[in-house]
C-alpha cells in the first residue's frame, strides 16, 4: 500500500491568519481585545477582513469610579466596547452579558460561544490564552477554555442551544495574552491606533495605566519584532483544528 506524502513543515506550522476575510475576536471583558490584540485587529480590518467582536461578560464590576452602580457600569462598558472596536475597524458586535467575575461552567459557555461561531462563520477565532502561566483571573481562564472547546464543538452536527444553526468549523484559533507566540504580526503602523482604542475605555483607563501599558507593550513589541524587518510586533499562538486534539507536538507549533 502506498503511503501518502505529508509536508511535515506545513503540518508543524501555524495557519496564516492575515488572509482571513472574516474573524471573531472573543473577549472576557469589554477591553481585552484592544489590549491583547488591538494592533492585529486594526491590521486585519485594514486588509478588508470583516471583524466581529464577542464579549462574554458585561464588565459590571470594573469601573475606576466606585460610586457608579454595576448596572450603569455595564451600560457604559458596552458603549465603550463598541466605540473602541469600531475605532479599530470592527464591524459587528455580539454580547453574552454574563456578570463580571461570575463565569464557572466551561461546557455551557462553550455552547453559547459555539452558537455565535455558527452564526458568524469566521475563518479564524481569537481569545485569551487560558494556559498562560500564573493567569489568576478565572474569567480569562474559563473564557479561553470555553473558546478552545467551542472551536471544535461548532463543527458538530448539533450543539446544545444551537437553535437550528448550521455546523461551522473555523480553520484557526489564535490566542492573545500568550507566553508562547508562534505568530508575530507587524503592528508598527497600527500601534497608535491600538492605544487610541484602549483610551476609549474611559471607565477603566487613567493616565498612569495608559502610560504603563504603552511602556510595556512598546518594549514587548520591539522584542517580538527583533530580526523580523519591522519595528513593533504583536504575538499570538495560532493553531489549526488538527493541532487542538491529541496532537502531542502542539506546544512546538
Image (cartoon, rainbow, N blue to C red):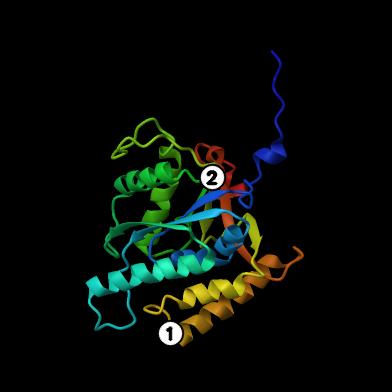
Give residue 143's position: percent from left, percent from top: 38, 55
Residue occupied by mark 2: 123
Q: Nearer the viewer, mark 1 or mark 2?
A: 2
Q: Quadrant of the N terminus?
A: top right
Q: Residue at x 48, y 61 (%)?
A: 133
Along the horizontal axis of the image, is 35 left or right of 166? right
The residue beneath circle 1 is 206
Q: Secondary structure at mark 1?
A: loop
Q: Is residue 224 above or below residue 64?
A: above
Where residue 238 sits: x, y (%)?
57, 50
Specify whether 220 is left or right of 213: right
Q: Which mark is residue 84?
A: none
Camera-nearest residue between 245 and 75: 75
Res 61 seen here: no
**Residue plotted at (35% across, 32% down):** 158
Write the residue at 38% across / 47% down. Answer: 116
Q: Is residue 119 visible in this depiction of the protein? A: yes
Residue 228: x %, y % from top left: 75, 63
Q: Note whether 154 is above or below 174 in the view shown.
A: above
The number of numbered badges drawn on the structure is 2
Q: Earlier in the sequence, mark 1 or mark 2?
A: 2
Position of residue 156 relative to residue 3, above or below, is: below
Amino acid at each position: 500500500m502506498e503511503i501518502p506524502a505529508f509536508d511535515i513543515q506545513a503540518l508543524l506550522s501555524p495557519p496564516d491568519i492575515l488572509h482571513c476575510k472574516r474573524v471573531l475576536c472573543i473577549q472576557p471583558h469589554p477591553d481585552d481585545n484592544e489590549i491583547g490584540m488591538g494592533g492585529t485587529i486594526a491590521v486585519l480590518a485594514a486588509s478588508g477582513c470583516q471583524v466581529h467582536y464577542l464579549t462574554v461578560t458585561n464588565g459590571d464590576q470594573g469601573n475606576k469610579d466606585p460610586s457608579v452602580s454595576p448596572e450603569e457600569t455595564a451600560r457604559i462598558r458596552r458603549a465603550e466596547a463598541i466605540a473602541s472596536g469600531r475605532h479599530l475597524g470592527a464591524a459587528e458586535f455580539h454580547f453574552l452579558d454574563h456578570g463580571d467575575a461570575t463565569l464557572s461552567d466551561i461546557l455551557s459557555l462553550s455552547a453559547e460561544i459555539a452558537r455565535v461561531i455558527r452564526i458568524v462563520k469566521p475563518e479564524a477565532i481569537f481569545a485569551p490564552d487560558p494556559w498562560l502561566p500564573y493567569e489568576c483571573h478565572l474569567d480569562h481562564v474559563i473564557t479561553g477554555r470555553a473558546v478552545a472547546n467551542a472551536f471544535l464543538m461548532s463543527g458538530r452536527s448539533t450543539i446544545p442551544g444551537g437553535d437550528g444553526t448550521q455546523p461551522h468549523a473555523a480553520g484557526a484559533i489564535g490566542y492573545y495574552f500568550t507566553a508562547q507566540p508562534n505568530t508575530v504580526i507587524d503592528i508598527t503602523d497600527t500601534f497608535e491606533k491600538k492605544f487610541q482604542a484602549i483610551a476609549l475605555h474611559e471607565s477603566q483607563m487613567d493616565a498612569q495605566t495608559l502610560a504603563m501599558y504603552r511602556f510595556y507593550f512598546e518594549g514587548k513589541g520591539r522584542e517580538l519584532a527583533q530580526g523580523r524587518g519591522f519595528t513593533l510586533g504583536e504575538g499570538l499562538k495560532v493553531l489549526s483544528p488538527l493541532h487542538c486534539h491529541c496532537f502531542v507536538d502542539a506546544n512546538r507549533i
